[in-house]
Amino acid sequence: MVRIQTHHLNESGDWDRHSSMVVTVEQYCDVIFTKSLPLC
């Protein structure tokens, strides 16, 4: 399992980096390749 931060735009238009979730490596890679999220 890997802990990653979910990047959601909050009401002011900034990235909300306080939200986090635990996913498997496969799920993480799927999110990266489908959503093009940065590795940060």
Image: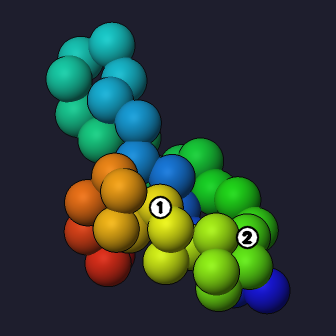
> Is disc 1 placed on a helix, strand or loop?
helix
Dot 1 corresponds to which residue? 31
Relative vertical location of residue 3 with respect to residue 17 in this rendering, above or below: below
Residue 23 at what x, y percent from top left? 73, 70
Tell me what residue is drawn at x 32 percent, y 78 percent: 39
Residue sitting nearer the eye, 11 or 28 = 28
Q: Quadrant of the rendered structure where residue 33 is?
A: bottom left
Disc with the residue nearer the chain's start (1 vs 2): 2
Relative vertical location of residue 29 with respect to residue 20 in this rendering, above or below: below
Tell me what residue is drawn at x 20 percent, y 23 percent: 13
Q: Quadrant of the rendered structure where residue 2 is?
A: bottom right
The answer to whether residue 25 is visible is yes
Do the residues under discs 1 and 2 have CB atoms within 8 angstroms?
Answer: yes
Dot 2 corresponds to which residue? 23
Furthest-top residue in this view? 11
Furthest-left residue in this view? 13
Tell me: 22 left or right of 28: right
Tell me what residue is drawn at x 75 percent, y 68 percent: 22
> Is disc 2 placed on a helix, strand or loop?
strand
- Residue flagged by tag 1: what amino acid is it? Val
Please state, as top left, top right, bottom left or bottom right, where the C terminus lies in the image: bottom left
- Residue flagged by tag 2: what amino acid is it? Val
